[in-house]
Image (cartoon, helix red, strand yellow):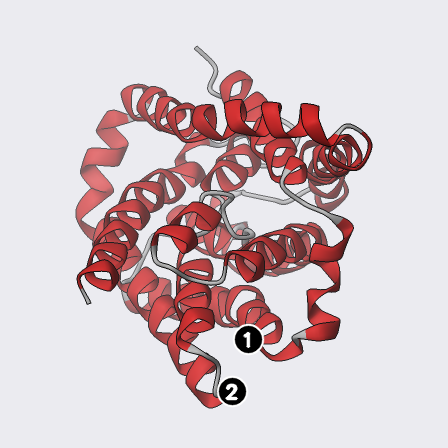
Amino acid sequence: MNTIWIVLPILTLLMFELGLNLKLEDFKLFKTRPKPVLAGLIGQIIVLPLLAWFIGKAFGLEPIFLIGFVLIACCPGGSSSNVFSMLAKGDVALSVSLTACSSIITLVTVPLIMEWVTAVTGSAIDVHLPVGKLLMQNIVLMFLPIVVGILVRKNWSHAADKMHNILSRIAFPALIFLATVFFIQNRDAIIASFGQLGLSITVLILLAMGSGALLCRSMRLTGQERRTIVIEVGMQNAAQAIAIASSPLVFNNDIIAIPAIIYALMMNIILITYVAIIKRR
């Protein structure tokens, strides 16, 4: 089974479900509350890719894994972050706004950052990035489904609520199904690299969450905003990273997707633990 025919529909579904949850006002939060939005975007768009690059180098990741490692850090926040923010009694409106804004901004930043990464590391292993095709794939699989979801919400709000209730329950199991299929097909490579990648990804997530908390403290944000940004910076869209890695239009390489699969596992374990600690407090 070619995983690309699983990941592409799942990514499109996730983006459409995100759009169903959005209103045009969600994109205007930066105007009314600039500090928390700015803190979250700096953490996701700038700090996280830089952390991934230096951590990957420090752990001596192979070039093929380093590309996948930085790729997952470049991706926008995951749609499940809104649920985690709610469970942690965070600012759900801020979470939705950050997920929406990062999903749009990374349409441009992912190709730019990954073009540099592959230029630096990919030549040694004959990996190249067709930037135009990546940009086009992101527009078709991410931007358009979000726009369609927003339009459905605007024009048929009752139907949007029904679809959102159904899709929000399907989204996470679909991602788990994708990860399971991918693991079965690439289990030898995943098992062989899990020790080094699992440790480096754990360090990345913890440092990303810590950086998000420091950004919030430096901007004197509320505890509710801080919990949300910690989750947003620590939770990236693994489905998009897998789609970019395995797409025949882009990298067409399942090995590059392995860090995203391991990231999806560690991310959920760490953030579930974080939410449990918050609830206990």
Which amino acid type is marked by label 1? Ala
Give the residue at x 42% y 62%.
Answer: 90
Q: Residue at x 45, y 23 (%)?
A: 170
Give the number of callouts: 2
Q: Residue at x 30, y 45 (%)?
A: 268
- Which residue is tagged 2? 219
Q: Position of residue 151 (x, y in %)?
A: 80, 35
In the image, taking residue 79 as reference, residue 17 lies left or right, namely right
Of the 4 image quadrants, the one containing the C terminus is bottom left
Residue with the most extreme top position: 1
Say which of 281 and 14 sits in front: 281
> In the rendered image of this protein, does residue 156 appear above or below residue 268?
above
Quadrant containing the N terminus in the rendered view: top left
Q: CA distance from mark 2 to mark 1?
A: 8 Å
Residue receiving disc 1: 39
Q: Secondary structure at mark 1?
A: helix
Disc 2 residue type (three-letter)? Met
In the figure, residue 112 lies in which quadrant? bottom right
Residues under numbered marks 2 and 1 in contact, where contact means CB atoms less than 8 Å apart: yes
Q: Residue at x 47, y 45 (%)?
A: 125
In the image, 160: left or right of 229? right
At which x and y percent is residue 243?
54, 33
